[in-house]
Amino acid sequence: MREWRILEKHLPDSIWVRVYENRIDLLTAAIAGSQGTPYHDGLYFFDIRFPHDYPNSPPWVRYRSFGFRMNPNLYANGRVCLSLINTWVGNRTEKWNPGDSTILQLLISIQGLVLNERPYYNEPTLGVLPRMFSGDKMSNVYSEDTFVLSCKTMLCLLRRPPKGFESLVKSHFKERGFEILSAMMAYRSGECRVGCYGIRDGGGSSVQGRKGQPPRKFRAEIKQLVPLLATAFAGTGASVGNFVEQLAGEKVERDRGCACFCLSFLFSS
């Protein structure tokens, strides 16, 4: 099949495709989230089916969401809204072209245009949202929520890897587990903005983005996810450092500080 040959020759290292010899109308793709985005180091799975009149009609695409909506274009029910596959509005050059459009183009578009640095701005109804916050602030909050959902997706994949991708899921998170946990801790502490961990500018300096303490809800969710992911990553053979112990140490320090405050209050009374 022509599409298979194109994928075999041009597929980037950060996208994996599984085809089915007995069902040439189906394929499953795994896309790695790019660095510099709230999707970094995650794996995102899409099932693709070719209609009987392909390529005159675009492929049918379904995202394996695990019930999470982590992008304006990717719905919790698995629906993918994208001009290229005619599931969203777009001008003629953005829509499916039977003579030129390919599955490779579709996968690269999802990775680069959907799973991007600022997914908040993919929201088609952005213009009618309340303006009580600046766009950047809303975008930061959206990216934080997205990163949390990405971490939950990782947990789901490690517990139930898609059939045929078990080795990929295990090897990917074995390699990236420590960096993911490091990023979680950095984002929780406010050391850098979500998506900026490990990113450097042209001069080699760290790109930190917004600094300062993130929202309490975000910090609480990350604190809950770190030990769960650390356990799951350890199951792949990944190094998981002492991040769980660090979080436990925070509670000890808070309790100690509270005790000191109570004692000083009693003696001062």
Image (spheres, rainbow, N blue to C red):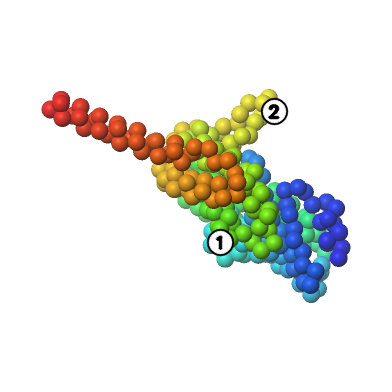
Residue that lies at the very extreme toward the left in this rendered image:
269
Q: Would you name the residue on which mark 2 appears?
A: 202
The spot of residue 224 in percent (x, y) is 44, 48
Q: Is residue 6 visible?
A: yes
Q: Residue sitting at 63 percent across and 34 percent down?
A: 199
Quadrant assignment for the C terminus = top left
Q: Would you name the residue on which mark 1 appears?
A: 66
Which of the two residues, 82 or 104, is positioned nearer the viewer here?
104
Which sits earlier in the primary sequence, circle 2 or circle 1? 1
The spot of residue 163 in percent (x, y) is 66, 63
Quadrant assignment for the N terminus = bottom right
Say what secondary structure mark 2 lies in. loop
Which of the two residues, 252 or 16, is positioned nearer the viewer here?
252
In this view, 49 is above or below 156: below
The spot of residue 260 in percent (x, y) is 25, 29
Q: Residue sitting at 66 percent across and 29 percent down?
A: 201
The spot of residue 195 in percent (x, y) is 59, 40
Along the horizontal axis of the image, is 250 left or right of 101?
A: left
Residue type pointed to by label 1: Phe
Q: Residue sitting at 83 percent across and 51 percent down?
A: 10
